[in-house]
Amino acid sequence: MGEGIALDLKKVPFSRRNAAYLFFEEDNSGGGISDRERFRHDDAPLLYSGEDEGETGYPPGLYITASSHGSTIRRKGLLRLIPTRGGEPADYTYRAAPEKLTIESGDGVIEIILDGDDSVRIRGRGLGLRFFTRMEFMEGAATLPDGTVCLEIFGIYFVGGSFYFRRLDGGITLDAAYNNQTCRTESATVELIPSENGTFETAIFSINPNEYEIESYKPFDECLAEIEGDFDAFRRRYGAEDTRLAALCEYLLWISYQDMDRLSAAPNLKADMIFSGRIRDVLAKMFHQPLHSLAVADSRAALGILLDAFAHISDRMLPTEVSRNRILFGAFPPAFGLALLELIKRPGAETLPTEQLRALYDGMAEHFGWWRTARSLGENSFSYNMPRECGYDAATYALCDFPLETPDLYAWLILYAEALAALAAAAGLGGADEWTACAKGLLDTLISELWDGDSFVCRGALSGRVFKCGSALTYLPIILGERLPREIAAKLAADLGDGAKFMSGRGFLSESREGPYFSAGESGRGAVDLPLQAVLILGLCAAGHGDTAAAAAAAVISAAETFGVRDVIVPDGEQPARAPADNGDSAAASALLAILASRGKE
Amino acid sequence: MFGTNERFTLRQAVFTREASFWAMYEDFKEPVLGVTVIKDGVFLENRQNVLILEATLNGAPVPYTYYSDESLLRMDTAHGTVEFCMDGAGQLRIRGRGVGLRMRVRAEKPFGSTEGCRGVYPTADGAWEADFGYSGKILFVPLDGAFLVSAPKDGEGRFYERVVFDFLPDVKNGAFEAVLHEYMTWRGRDRVYESFDAVRGATARAFEDFVNNNLKPPAKGWEELYRYAAYTVWSHRTAVCGAYLDTMAMYQQIWGGNCMGWQQSYNAMPMLKNPAEGWRLIRTLFAHQRPSGQIPGSVAYYGAGSMGMQPAFQGLALDWLIHSCGEDFLTPESCGEMYPRFTKWLNFWLKYRNAGYGDDRVYIINANESGWDDASEYVKGFPVETPDLYAFMILMMDCAGVLARRSGRHDEAESWTKRARALNDRLCGDLWNGERFFAYLTNTGEHVDSLSLATYQALVLGDKRIPKHISDKLAESVMSPDYLTDIGLTTESLKSPYCHFGYNFVLGRVITPCNMLTAVGLYRCGKREEAREICRNVCSNLLDKGLLLGFQPFDYEPTTGEPVVGYTIPSASDVWPWSAWAASSCLVMLTGILPDD
C-alpha cells in the first residue's frame, strides 16, 4: 500500500479517485497568485473595479480546495488549514501518503482522509484545526440550525466549491460577519475544537449532509482501510515494478481518475475518464487516453479505457477534451490503433468479451469515417487542418501549409486501420481485408511520397508543397516497427539517438537542436514531452533499435526521478517553477509506466 | 425598430432570433457592428469569437449606418447595402449589393487579438472553417460573388496576425451572397439553400406567430414597447441542443448567455394567451432535477449548474397563470407527471432549509437563494427567514395542492392547502410588525428590520392571503417618495442608510423585475391603480432607455449626496445591460396589469 510514497504537497496534491476535494501546500512558487487573479473567474469581469486589491498571494501553508473542472488554474474556493493549540496557531509538520494526510505538532496529531467522492474526514488529538478563507460577493457562510457550518464559495459565476462541516466529536464554530456595505461576507473562519478529552472528529461534505440522510458514520479507521484497498486495487491494473516512481505514477493516475457524470440530465462526461490532472487541465484529453491504455497491464482495464473514450462519439467525432463542465470537439492524433494493437498482444486478450470488441470496432470505424470525410482531400490522403491537431500546439508543423499531410498522422492511421482489421477478425465481423488494404495504401503513401531519402517530410494537402520539418513528430513512424523498410527505421533511430539532434540527457527533444526554431523550454518545440517519449521508445523497441530505446528510457526515468512526473521537462538546467501541486501529470505518469514496462523488452 | 434614427440601437438588445445563437450587436467602444456566437455563455468583455463588420468598396472600408427589425439587419452605405438574417438552425445568411463585407476576427480579450481563433482552413467542398475552440466553429459558405480569406501567421507560426474574411460582389451583377453555419462538432455545406428572402420570411412569421399565439395585446399606447419586449423575449429563447433539453429562456446573450433557474418562471408569466407554454417553461428546469429534489440555479449549453440554486419561484409564476387564465391548461396528465417532481423540489426546501420549529418555516443561507444579491434583509447574515421566501413557499404549496387535485390526489391537495394557510398565518403573524414585514435570523431569533423592496414582495400572495390592513399599509408606504420615483420603485428606501446606486444590485437601483413583482402584488391585493402607476413609470423609462435590468434614478447617492460611482466596464447604459428578464417583466406589466379591467 503505497509504502514509501511520501507526497510533497508542494508538488502534487493529496486527493483520491473521483474526489471532489484535494489538499496542497502553497509555497508561493511561480510568483504566487494575486488576489486580483484569485477573485476572477477566468471568463468573468471583475465586478468591483474600484476595490482594494488587498494582499498579494496566499500565505504559505496547507490548503483544501474543491475540484473545479476546466483548463485554467482556478484559484477559488480555497480554505487555509491552520492547526491550533489552545486557539493559537501551532507550528506543524505534515506527512502525506496516498491514503492519509497527517499533521503533527508536538504530541498533537490531525489525520485527514477522503472517505468518499465528495467528503473528507478529519480527526484530531491534542490539536484543533482552523480553516480560513477570504470571501467575495455572493459567497455565503452560515451555521445551520443543526450546527452544521457551511461555506459556499462559488460566487456569482458558480465556480469554486461548497464545504459543509458536520461535527462528529468536539465542537465547530464559525466566525463570518456579513458586511452589507460591501455586500459580502468578507472572510470566514471555521474552528474545529477538541472536546474535553482533547479529541475532535469532523466530516466535510460538498452538499448539506442531511441530503444523504446518513444514519451513522463509518468509523474513521474503516474508511481508511477502504481507501487503502481502493488504491491497491487500482495499482494492480498496472503490474509495474514496485518502485517509488512507479508508485507515484500510479497515485497520480488514481487521483486523476474521474467517474462518469451520473447526475446530469445531459452529461458531457459520459464514461469514466483519466483526467490530465487536478490542478491545471482538470479535464480528460482524448489524445492521451490511448497512452493511458498502453500503460495498463490488465487487458480488460486497458480495453475499458478505449471503450470509455468512444462513449463520447458524436457526429462521428470524438472530443479533444471533456470534463463535467464542457466538451470540445476537434481532431487529434488518432492513437487508438497503437493502443489496441498492443492490447491484443497481452496475456488474457483472447478472453476479451466479443461484444466489447464489437462496440469498439463500431466506434473506431465511425471515427475513421469522420477522418475520411473531414480530413481527407484524396484517396489515401489524410491531413491535419491546423497545427494543434497534431497534439502539440507549438510544433513546427505550424510553419507549413495547412491542411498538412504529416508522417505522424499517417503512422497513426496505418495502425488505426490495422487495429480495425484485427478487431473485425476478433469480433467475427467482416471487412478485415478492406482495412488491411487501407493500411497498406496508407503505408505506401507514407513511404513513397513522404520519405525523401533522408527523412520523412510534410506536404501541404492543397498546395502540394513539401516541407522538411525539424519536429520529432516526423520520426513518429518508428512506431510502425518492422513495417518500415529497415534502412528507414535505421535512419530514424540514428537521428533520434544523435545528441546533436534529438537525444538529450533527459529524453528525446521534441524538435531537433539543429533546427532554427528549437526552443528548449517549449513543449513541442524542443522540450522533452513525456507522452512523446513513450511512443518513440516503444516504436524503437518494435523496430529493433532497443539500444537507443534503452538509452532514452534511462534518461527519461532519471529525469522524472529528479524533477517529478511532469509532462514537459526542459532538457537543460532547472525546471521552470509551476503553481503549487502542479508537478504531476497523468499523461506523463502513463508514459513513465509504459516506459518502465518496456525495459527488458528491447 | 432599431437603427440610426430609431429609438433603440443594437447597443441594447442584439439582433438575433429564437433558436439562434448568433448575436449581432453594436460595439460599445466604437461605432461598428460585431457578430459572435454565444453558446459558450462567455461575457462580452472576454469573448474571443468576435467578428467585426466592415462594408467595403474595392477592398477599402466605407462608412455605414444600420437598420434592423425582428428579421433583418441591414448595413447601409452610399454605394450599396449588406443584409443579414438568421434561421433557427444555426445559419446566418448574408447578401450584399454594391459593396462587399469584411468580417475581421477581433477578440475582446486580449483586445484586438486573434487569440480565440485556433485555425482557419479550407474544406474539400469550397467552404472555409474557423475553429474557436469552446466557442464553437463557423463554416463560411460563399454562394455568390468572390470570397477571400487572409489569415497569415507570425514568422514562427504561433498565432494569426489577422483573420479576415472578405465577401466581394460579383463583377457581373454586383452582388454577393453567403451562408455562415455555427456548430460544435462538424458539418459540411448543405446541398441546397433556401433563398435569403425565404429565410427572412420564415423568421418574421415565427416572431409574429410567437406574439399572436402566446401574448395578450398590451394596454393601449404601449404597442412600440410591447413589440420590443416581445422581440427580446422571443429572441432569447434557445434551440434544443446541448444541455437545453427543451426550449428555455436565456437571461442575456452577449453578457452571459445562459438560462437562470428562476427566470424560466419570469418568462412564463407573460404567456397569458397560452398558459400551457408558460407551464412548459416552468417545467424545463425539472429535467435537471437532482436526486435530492434540488433544481439547478442555471442551465447553459454545456450543462446545468452544479452549485447553488435560485428561489422556488415556480409557484408564484404558476399561481399568476392560474389567476389570470384559469386552471384548464393544467391537464391531468401534466399534473400527474409534474406533481412528484414539483413536490420533490418543494420538499427539498421544507426539509433541507427547514428552520427547525416543527413546521414549514424555511431559511436561506446565501443571497443566491433569494435572487436578490445584496438586499438589506441580509445585513445581519445568514441563515435568515424572509417574507419573500415564505411567500414563495406558500405559493409552492398552494400550487402543489392544485397539481394534486387535478391529478386526483385529493388528500394530498387538502394537506398542501392546510400547510400553505398555516405558513401564511406565520408570515402575517410572526414577520409583520405593524408597519412592514421583516426578516428573522433563524439561529438567534433576532429581527432584521429592512427597508428593502424585497420586504414588499409577499404582496404577490394577493388579497385572498394577505389581510387588507397589511396590504393597505404596504401600499401606502411603497407608493411614498421613499420608494417611488419617476422611473419606478427603488429597491431600497431612499431614507435607508444602505441605499446605494453604485456597484450594488438591489440596494437602491430601480430594478425592472423587482418593480414588476411589487406591481403584481399590489394588483393582486386590489391596489390596481397603484400597480398601474408603478408600471407606467417603469415602462415609460424602458421605452426611453431600452429593456435594461436596472437604472439609477439619480446621479447622486441619496445617503451622501456624492456622484454615483459605478462600473467601469463598457455597457449599454449606466450599468446593467438589457435582458429577457427585464423584457418578460415588462410584458407582464404591459399585458397583465396596465390593461383596463
Image (tube, rainbow, N blue to C red):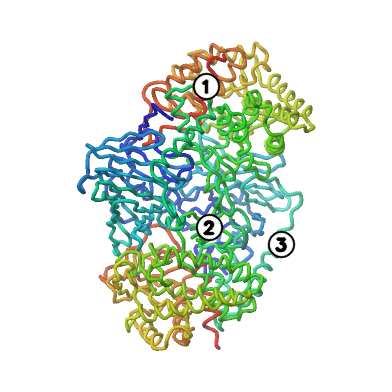
Name the residue: 56% across, 35% down. A388
Q: Which residue is mark 3?
A: B197
Q: Amino acid at mark 3?
A: Asp
Q: What is the crowding at mark 3: few (fewer than 14 residues within 10 Å), some, or many (at least 20)?
A: few
Question: Is residue B133 shown above or below B219?
Answer: above
Marks 2 and 1: which is nearer the front?
A: 2
Q: Which is nearer the N-term, disc 3 or disc 2?
A: 3
Element type where label 1 sits in the image: helix
Mark 2 and mark 1 residues within 8 Å of each other at the beta carbon: no
Q: Position of residue B52 (x, y in %)?
A: 54, 51
Q: Nearer the viewer, mark 3 or mark 2?
A: 2
Label 1 – label 3 distance at C-alpha = 62 Å
Q: Within 10 Å of the Cα at label 2, are there few (<14), some (14-19), or many (20+) other Cα atoms?
A: some
Instruction: Tell me the SS state at disc 3.
Output: helix
Query: Which label was assigned to residue A538?
Result: none
Q: Residue at x 65, y 59 (%)?
A: B86
User: Which residue, given by chain and number where applicable, does mark 1 sit on?
Assistant: A595
Chain where mark 3 sits: B
Q: Element type at marker 2?
A: loop
Residue shown at 50% from the left, 30% from the top: A235
The reply to whether dot 1 and dot 3 touch (C-beta < 8 Å) is no
Q: Are marks 1 and 3 on the same chain?
A: no
Task: Give the Cα separation between the discs numbered 3 and 2.
Answer: 45 Å
Q: Amino acid at mark 2?
A: Arg
**Are callouts 3 and 2 both on one chain?**
yes
- Where is mark 2, residue-wise? B290
| Residue A459 in view of the camera | no
Count of numbered labels shown in the rendering:
3
Disc 1 marks which amino acid?
Answer: Ile
For residue B492, above or below residue A602: below
Q: Nearer the viewer, residue A170 or A392?
A: A170
Quadrant holding the N terminus of chain B:
bottom right
